[in-house]
Every structure is written in structure tokens, then in C-alpha cells.
Image (cartoon, coloured by chain):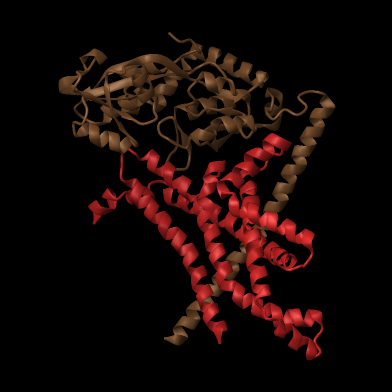
């Protein structure tokens, strides 16, 4: 057992403050993704409502925005916001802040599209029935449309949330030290003493990401089941 | 069974709710920080305009750095023994040792920025760091984009071979023999240009090349001399027969192009550090475990003077 622990490089985890540093790196990941997710949900719902407007101008703007997000790799967006902003307008963002901007920019677009889809999937007769029962516009939205929308939205948006969390290792490229970077630092510092540390460390990273994403998925499938009746 | 699950889910829901709340709170405090950052940047720009100097320069001059009380130095955080983070989370290495000294002599705090090799030029050009001290090899192409100070280390190519059949000159390599290189390295480029008669076996990664070499796929392995020296020192039965091949390259600190006040200060610093043989001390503190004492004169450049 002891030999296995050493061979697979789990021993380096317990050297000095290595494990705490790894958790610290994971906290950076979590912080950035949760802030972005929270902002994306709020902004995305607003965007989704705007997207259902029949106005051709808002339609065109939303379309262009959505296509930009779909076409551009997140890494390119990160570079543009972090380095490009400094180059073009001399704004010096902190890297974490640049990361939040990019992830929110991305999350808002995708969330907006999901909200639009969910809103449009509510059949017209639901509105008409509500009006004929004497409900006004806001009553119709709050008691009829929005509850149904949220149910349809939930599984899809949870998928988006876990996707955003899993994309965070990209922020290494704009000099943010998060979990995978800490792992690489530890591997390199021990490359002579424990050459196989990569296995142990990335296994721990896997467990950490799993611990973060699995409860979110569980909650989603639970709510889905609960609301399906 | 069903009851138990409901409890579990309730617990999970509470946990996630807490995380969300913390996240939102962090978002608010973060936003305030960021606002401050932007306001400060604008204020800085306004100050510069008032002083009438360096209007829209992206870099910080020597005076600005001193006034701010901290200097941002870009170093590697995963290139042991030049720049790495030890098990207590502290930056260490040959470059880091020098970086700490620079901050000390400037009388400011040092703030290390973990840098990726491919981003070193960009980080300087966008003013994300004041100095790059990340094993930065001086090349003509790079010198057009950033300003290099005086060198503090030598780097050349080296060739390692089995101790019982040491290759000390390239002419010893026969027509049937192969030399191992890693694709895309300076060693590959140099040998293809200058010794096209030598057969090369190319591997994509360090570990593939190492395995092939140890299994006798080639009579020698050519790579950066720091790499082959470190290899021969850790693996028994191999000797660096050619410690220096081709032209000498140097490693030097770099600043944003045009940042003369900082560049001149670093050059003076490197010159004056020669009196106390600073870089020899640096070598003995950080590199001697990897390279041994024998290569000290080969690798260290003192006072910016290349011998």
C-alpha cells in the first residue's frame, strides 16, 4: 500500500502545504465560475426576454452577440479581454476580473438562448387561457408562464453551469493560478523526487471537479423528477 | 429508501444554496475591487497627463514603480530549478533569487506573476508585468519586441552519450548512427542546418526522447545543455561529452520596449552585483543541486560580461 501511494505520487500531496494549495487553486476556480454563473443567470434571463421581442433591431443585435459567442473559442475571448483591452484602450484588468467578464459574456449568451427557447415553448393557449380567466399581463407571466419556463430551463442550465466550471482551467493562459496550474507547479517541483506525481495529482483534481459538479447534477435530476408530476 | 434520498437532496440543496450566496457576495466585493482598479487606472492616466510625461505608455517607469511600493515580476512557476513553487507555496529558483534581490535594492515589495512561456512577450507589451525574469533567451526576433537588459546566464546546446562510448565531437558520429532530438527545439534546428549529414531521430516529448535514448535508439541525445547536464547528473552511466555546441545564447531580464529608466537601472544593478559575485552565489543556492559545481563557470554570467 505504502509503495503504491509513493509510486503513484500521492505522497507529494502531503508535503508542506501542497494539499491546501491545491484546494486554494480549486477555490479560485469555483469563485470565478460561481460569480460568472450567478451573473449569467440574471443577465441571461433578461436577455432571453429581450430575444423574444419582435423588434428587428434587438433581434439583429442578439443574433450577432450569440453568434460571436458560439464562434469564438473561449481562449480567444480571454486573450482579447485580458491582453487586448490593455493594448487597445490601456485598461489593466486583474486576470480574475477578465476571466469573470469572459465567462459571464459567454454564459449570458447561452443562458439567454435557453431562456428564449423555454419561453417560446410555452404554448399560446396558456397565455390565452390566462387572459380569458381575467389575469392581467404580469399575473400571467408570474403565475403561469415563468413557473413552467423554469421547469423546462433547469436541466439545460445546469448543463451550462457544469460546462462553465469545467472550462475554467483555460484561465491559466491569462496567468491565473488555479487548481491545474498548482498541480503542474507541484509536479515540476518534485520531478526528480517523485516522477509519477502527475498521476496522483491529476487524480485528485478529477476528484475535486467531480465533488463540485456531481451535487449540481444530482440536484438538477432531483428537481426534474419532482416537477415532472 | 425514498425518505433517505429526500433528506440527502435537502442537504445538497442547502449546501448549494450556501455556495451560491457566497458566490454572489464574492461577486459584489469583487466588482468593487475591479471598479477601484478602473478608477485608479483612469486617475493614473490623468496624473500622467498632468505631469506631461509618458502620456499613454503602457509600462511603468522606475519612479512610478518606486512610488507604488511594489514591482510585478513575471517568472515561471513550473520550471524547476529556474522558477518554481516549493511545497510551502513559496517561489524559488535561479530567476526568483535575482528577482527578490531586484525588489530589495529598489526598496519595494515583489509581486510574482506566474507566466507561461508563450505569453512572456505579450505580458510585457501589455504592461501586465514590469520585468520578465523567466529564463528568457535573448533572440533577435524577441529583441525587436521587448528590451533585454544585460545577460545573467549562458545557454548553449549540449550532447549527452553513454559513459562507455562518450561522444566528444560530432565527427565521431558514424553514418549508421542516429542522434536523438526533441521536435521543435533549438537542437533540432541547429543540427539540421549545420550538420545535415547526421541522422536525427525526433520525438515529440521529453519523456519519449528519454525512453528512446535509454533503450539505445541513438548514440547520443542533443538538447539544451542545462537539460543534458541535469540528465547526466541524475541518471547513472551517462556523460555530457559536448557541453557546448554552436553559438552561445544568453538569458537576460526583459522590460517593455522603451522603458529606459527601468532598463538602465537593471543594467547598473547587474554590473554592480559583480562586486559581490552575486550570480555565483545565486548558482550555489539554487542550481548546484541540479547541475553540480563543475558547470558553474559554464552557465553563470557575472556583471553582464560574456567570456
Which residue is the extreme one toward the left?
Answer: B164
Residue furthest to the right: B50
Q: Position of residue A134 (x, y in %)?
A: 81, 89
Number of numbered discs on residues:
0
Q: Which quadrant holds the C terminus of chain A? A: bottom right
Q: Position of residue B239 (x, y in %)?
A: 23, 22
With B140 as the anchor, is B191 left or right in this view? Answer: left
- The red-coloured chain is labelled A
Residue under the point 66% across and 22% down: B259
Q: Quadrant of residue B82?
A: top left
In the rendered image, the vertical position of residue B33 relative to residue A34, given as above or below: above
Q: Residue at x 60, y 42 (%)?
A: A79
Along the line of sight, which residue is nearer the eye, B13 or A67? Answer: A67
Quadrant for the N terminus of chain A in the image: bottom left
Q: Name the quadrant containing residue B13.
A: bottom right
As drawn, the residue found furthest toward the bottom would be A133
In this orientation, does residue A94 appear? Answer: no
Q: Position of residue B149 (x, y in %)?
A: 56, 18
Where B131 falls versus A78 (above or below)?
A: above
Residue at the front extreme of this rendering: A56
- Give the image location of residue B214, x and y in percent: 21, 33
Please report the residue visible at 43 percent of the width from the left and 20 percent of the height from the top.
B281
Q: Can the viewer see residue A134?
A: yes
Identity of the residue drawn at 69% across and 24% down: B61
Question: Which quadrant of the figure has residue B178?
Answer: top left
Q: Left of B85 or right of it: where is A9? A: left
Task: Judge whether A180 appears above or below B170 on screen.
Answer: below
Colour representing chain B:
brown
Amino acid at each position: 500500500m505504502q509503495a503504491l501511494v509513493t509510486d503513484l505520487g500521492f505522497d507529494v500531496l502531503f508535503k508542506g502545504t501542497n494539499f491546501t494549495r491545491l484546494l486554494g487553486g480549486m477555490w479560485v476556480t469555483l469563485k470565478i465560475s460561481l460569480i460568472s454563473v450567478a451573473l449569467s443567470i440574471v443577465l441571461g434571463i433578461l436577455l432571453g426576454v429581450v430575444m423574444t421581442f419582435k423588434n428587428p433591431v434587438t433581434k439583429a443585435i442578439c443574433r450577432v452577440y450569440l453568434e460571436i459567442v458560439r464562434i469564438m473559442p473561449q481562449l480567444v475571448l480571454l486573450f482579447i479581454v485580458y491582453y487586448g483591452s490593455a493594448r487597445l484602450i490601456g485598461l489593466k484588468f486583474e486576470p480574475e476580473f477578465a476571466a469573470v467578464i469572459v465567462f459571464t459574456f459567454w454564459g449570458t449568451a447561452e443562458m439567454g438562448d435557453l431562456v428564449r427557447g423555454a419561453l417560446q415553448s410555452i404554448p399560446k393557449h396558456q397565455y390565452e387561457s390566462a387572459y380569458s380567466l381575467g389575469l392581467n399581463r404580469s399575473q400571467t407571466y408570474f403565475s403561469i408562464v415563468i413557473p413552467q419556463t423554469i421547469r423546462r430551463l433547469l436541466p439545460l442550465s445546469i448543463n451550462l453551469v457544469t460546462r462553465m466550471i469545467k472550462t475554467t482551467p483555460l484561465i491559466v493562459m491569462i496567468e491565473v493560478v488555479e487548481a491545474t496550474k498548482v498541480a503542474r507547479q507541484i509536479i515540476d517541483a518534485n520531478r526528480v523526487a517523485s516522477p509519477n506525481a502527475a498521476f496522483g495529482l491529476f487524480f485528485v483534481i478529477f476528484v475535486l471537479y467531480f465533488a463540485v459538479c456531481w451535487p449540481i447534477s444530482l440536484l438538477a435530476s432531483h428537481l426534474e423528477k419532482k416537477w415532472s408530476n | 429508501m425514498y425518505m433517505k434520498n429526500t433528506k440527502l437532496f435537502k442537504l445538497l440543496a442547502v449546501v448549494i444554496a450556501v455556495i451560491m450566496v457566497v458566490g454572489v457576495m464574492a461577486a459584489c466585493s469583487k466588482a468593487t475591487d475591479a471598479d477601484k482598479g478602473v478608477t485608479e487606472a483612469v486617475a493614473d492616466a490623468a496624473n500622467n497627463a498632468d505631469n506631461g510625461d509618458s502620456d499613454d505608455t503602457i509600462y511603468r517607469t522606475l519612479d512610478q514603480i518606486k512610488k507604488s511600493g511594489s514591482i510585478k515580476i513575471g517568472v515561471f512557476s513550473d520550471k524547476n530549478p529556474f522558477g518554481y513553487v516549493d511545497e510551502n507555496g513559496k517561489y524559488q529558483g535561479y530567476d526568483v533569487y535575482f528577482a527578490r534581490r531586484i525588489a530589495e535594492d529598489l526598496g519595494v515589495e515583489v509581486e510574482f506573476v506566474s507566466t507561461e512561456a508563450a505569453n512572456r512577450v505579450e505580458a510585457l507589451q501589455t504592461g501586465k508585468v514590469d520585468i520578465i525574469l523567466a529564463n528568457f533567451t535573448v533572440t533577435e526576433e524577441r529583441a525587436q519586441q521587448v528590451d533585454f537588459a544585460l545577460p545573467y546566464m549562458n545557454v548553449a546546446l549540449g550532447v549527452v552519450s553513454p559513459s562507455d562510448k562518450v561522444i566528444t565531437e560530432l565527427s565521431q558520429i558514424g553514418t549508421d548512427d542516429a542522434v536523438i532530438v526533441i521536435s521543435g527545439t533549438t537542437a533540432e534546428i541547429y543540427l539540421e542546418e549545420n550538420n545535415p549529414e547526421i541522422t536525427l531521430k525526433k520525438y515529440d516529448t521529453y519523456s519519449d526522447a528519454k525512453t528512446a535514448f535509454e533503450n539505445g535508439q541513438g548514440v547520443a541525445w542533443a538538447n539544451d545543455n542545462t537539460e543534458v547536464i541535469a540528465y547526466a547528473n541524475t541518471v547513472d552511466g551517462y556523460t555530457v561529452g559536448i557541453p557546448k555546441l554552436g553559438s552561445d545564447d544568453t538569458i537576460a531580464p526583459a522590460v517593455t520596449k522603451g522603458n529606459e529608466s527601468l532598463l538602465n537601472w537593471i543594467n547598473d544593478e547587474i554590473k554592480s552585483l559583480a562586486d559581490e559575485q552575486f550570480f555565483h552565489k545565486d548558482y550555489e543556492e539554487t542550481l548546484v543541486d541540479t547541475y553540480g559545481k563543475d558547470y558553474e563557470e559554464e552557465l553563470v554570467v557575472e556583471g553582464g560580461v560574456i567570456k
